[in-house]
Image (cartoon, rainbow, N blue to C red):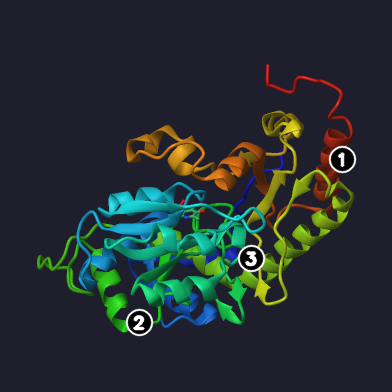
Amino acid sequence: MRINFGELVIGDTAKRYLHRVVDKNWASEGDNVKEFEEKFAAKFGYKHAIATSSGTDADIVSCAVLYDFGAKRGDEIVVPALCFVACVNSILAAGFTPKFVDIELETLNIDPSKIEAAITDRTKAIMVVHTMGKPCEMDTILEVAKKYDLRVIEDACEAHGATYKGKVVGTIGDMGTFSFYTAHQIVCGEGGMVVTNDDEIAGVVRSIKSHGRPPGSIYFDFQRIGYNSKMNDLEAALGLEGIEQFEENFNKRKNNLYKLLELTGELSDYFYFIKEENYEKVSPHAFPLVLKDEKYDRDRLYNYLESKDIQCKTLFGSLPTQHKAFKFLGYNKGQFPVAEYVGESGLHFGMHQYISDDDLVYISDSLREYFKNHEISQDYTRK
Ligand SMILES: Cc1ncc(COP(=O)(O)O)c(C=O)c1O
C-alpha cells in the first residue's frame, strides 16, 4: 500500500454538517462556514477568523489588505526565497513585488538576520512562512518590522496550532493564514483562513474576500478591489470535523514524527532535520529531510522512495533562482545559497495521522537501506 502525503477520511461529524447543506439546499458560504470560523477562532484563541476558498486566497487577501493602510501597487513584500510557491504567487496576484530573503538551513525558515538588507522605501510588509510547522524567529522579525513600520503576515498554512514562546502562530504578527488542503493538519479538501486580532483588518479581509463589498453586504457597493475568495458550506463541513479531531490528530502526527526521528537516529550523519526548541511547539506538517552531502543524490533518493511507494515531494526550491516562473524578476543563481542547497538536496514526505507504526518502521528501514547502500550504484528511476 502506498504511503501517501496526506489522506482524508470523512466521518460522522462531517456527514452531519454535509446533511445540513442538503437539508437547506444551500452550498455557498452559510451556516457551516460561520460555525467553522467561530470554532476555529475559539480553538486557537484568535479574535477573528475569516474563511477563504484556499490558503492561496488567504495569502492574496492578506496582501491586498495593505492597500487600506497606505500601500500602493508595486510596493514590496519581503518573503523567504524558499517556501511553497503560493506565497510568492499571492504577493504578485495582489499587485505587489516580492523581495526575497534567504533561509536558514537548521529551521528552513526566513533568516531573520538578512531581512533588513532587503528592505527599501517601498517595502510595506514581511510575509514569514512557518515552514513544515516550525515557527519562525518572531522576536527578531517583529523588531525589524517595528523599526521600519512594516506589517507582518504570518503564513501558517503548514503550522496549525504551533506556538512560539507561548503564543499561537497566526496573530503574533498582524495577520495569519491557514490552508485546509489535504495533508494539512485540518482538511476541508480545499479551503483557507485569515486570522487577526485587529478589528479594522478583520473588516477589510471580510470585504476583500467578497468582491470588496462592505463586510456582510451582498449588494453592489464596491469599496475596494476584491475577489471571490469565499469558502463554501461543503468544505466547512469537513473542517468542522477537523476541529473536533484536532488534538487527536495533532498528537498522532507528533508521535509519528518523534517515532520516525527515533527510528532514524543513527542516520543523523546523512541528513539534517528541523529540531523543536524548548520555547516552541512545532506543528507536524510533514517529514522534511535535507541531505548533508550532495553525494547522497536527492533525485536518486526521491526515485528510490517513490519506488518503495512512499510518496515524496522535493523541498520547494529557491523560487527566484530555481524556478522558470520567476525568472522575469531578474535574480541570479547564487543569490540565495541556502535555499538553493535545500532546493537541490531536500525532500519531504507525509507525517499524517493515518501513517501507522508499521509504516514508520517501513520508512526508516527504507531510508537505512538507501544510505547504507549509497555506494552501490542502482538506478531507481521509474521505467
Ligand atoms: C506555506 C503555504 N502557503 C500557502 C499554501 C497554499 O494553500 P492552498 O493549497 O490551500 O491554496 C500552502 C499549501 O500547501 C502552503 O504550504
- Which residue position is annotated with label 3? 283
> Which is nearer the eye, 304 or 329?
329
Residue 315 place in picture, x, y as percent = 59, 44
Label 3 element class: loop
| Residue displayed at 12% across by 65% down | 222
Which image quarter holds the C terminus?
top right
Q: Would you say the beta carbon of the disc 2 residue lies within 8 angstroms of ligand 1?
A: no
The residue type indicated by label 3 comes to Ser
The residue type indicated by label 1 comes to Arg
Q: Few, some or many C-alpha atoms within 10 Å of disc 3 (few <14, some 14-19, many ≥20)?
A: many
Q: Which image quadrant for residue 35? A: bottom left
Residue 88 place in picture, x, y as percent = 39, 50
Q: Few, some or many C-alpha atoms within 10 Å of disc 2 (few <14, some 14-19, many ≥20)?
A: some
Label 2 element class: loop
Left or right: residue 253 versus residue 125 is: right
- What's the distance in space between the residues labelled 1 and 3, CA to CA? 26 Å
- Which residue position is annotated with label 1? 368
Residue 2 place in picture, x, y as percent = 71, 38
The residue type indicated by label 2 comes to Asp
- Which residue position is annotated with label 2? 198
Q: Would residue 169 be seen by someone viewing this image from the given angle?
A: no
Q: Reading the chain from its start, which is encountered first: label 1 or label 3?
A: 3
| Residue displayed at 19% across by 65% down | 212
- What's the distance in space between the residues labelled 2 and 1, CA to CA? 49 Å
